[in-house]
Amino acid sequence: MDQVNLDAWVGKTVSDVGGVGAATAIKVHATIGRSGDPAPRAGDLLPPLWHWSAFAPTAHTDLLGADGHPAPGTLLPPMGLPRRMWAGGALGFHAPVRVGDTLHRHTSVRSVETKTTRTGRPMALVTLDHMIFGPQGLAIEERQDIVYLPMPERFVPPHPRAMPADTAESMEMTPTLLFRYSAVTFNAHRIHYDLDYAQSVEKYPGLVVHGPLQAALLMRHATEQAGSQPVYFDFRAVHPVFAGTPLDICATEEDGTVVLFTGQNGHQGMQATAVFEATQ
């Protein structure tokens, strides 16, 4: 599609209603919560980024593409580039969200851009804006960055970047963890649970760890370190990471800002920043 046609998608909107009930909160906790902590119950504060289980994609299985994603055309433009990934985003937190709250989400297409990679291949970036409202009004403002690429003939990883600090925490990235996170977010993208597809079609060396899963683990680390929820959080994937190798987390803190990284084998996978309100 040419840029003129792509521009026609800018400003498109959809709205949906969701929430994280007690049963879902128990499943999310069993997936990414600390095993020694109790699961949130109805009325408890919902941990930040758990709202990614609040709005399950409702496309029927018959309408999913070969990769497991819903077919484009309702909100996301048909880019003609079959490899899709959630590359990053940013969130502002304005009001608390609790387990059992009814949430209203309004989503709009901010921009659609076409680019060329360093290797000369086509690339597209679609940016969505989500406004999420709870019982107290606007609760979360969120930007979501989605990248589209052609299917590669072989896996060519980005240039690695070294982890900038000592490892503060390390977690096993098992196929079971990836499957469970796909389940609690209702994400059917096959790169996270179908090893044959990930290797033979998208040419990854293994199952790919979700970007949102990495972000959620970084958020968990940041909130535990600070003892509170941030008012702002952003994240950006810089290198894919895979099941079968531990995921390391490191963090640095200065003046209410925590800069975090995931990584494997000493190389960064994701960068994130959490900003906290200043304490008196």
Image (tube, grey):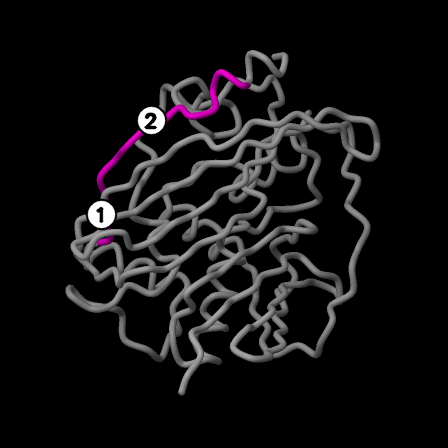
Residue at 56%, 73% in the rendered image: 258
Name the residue that disc number 2 marks: 59
**Is residue 213 shown in magenta?**
no
Q: Considering the image in quadrants, where does the C terminus appear?
A: bottom left
Q: Distance between the residues labelled 1 and 2?
A: 19 Å
- Residue at x-position 51% and y-position 67%: 274
Which residue was labeled with disc 1? 103
Of discs 1 and 2, which sits in the foreground?
A: 1
Three-letter residue code for mark 1: Leu
Mark 2 residue element? loop
Residue 9 among magenta residues: yes
Relative to 85, 227 lies left or right: left
The percent position of residue 186, horizontal first and vertical second, equals 36, 42
Of residues 14 and 202, the one drawn nearer to the viewer in this rendering = 14
Q: What residue type is labelled 2?
A: Ala
- The residue located at (74%, 65%) in the rendering is 265
Q: Which residue is drawn at 59% across and 78% down?
A: 253
Residue 5 % position (x, y) = 55, 12
The picture places residue 18, in percent across and down from the top left corner, at: 23, 43
What range is drawn magenta here? 7-20
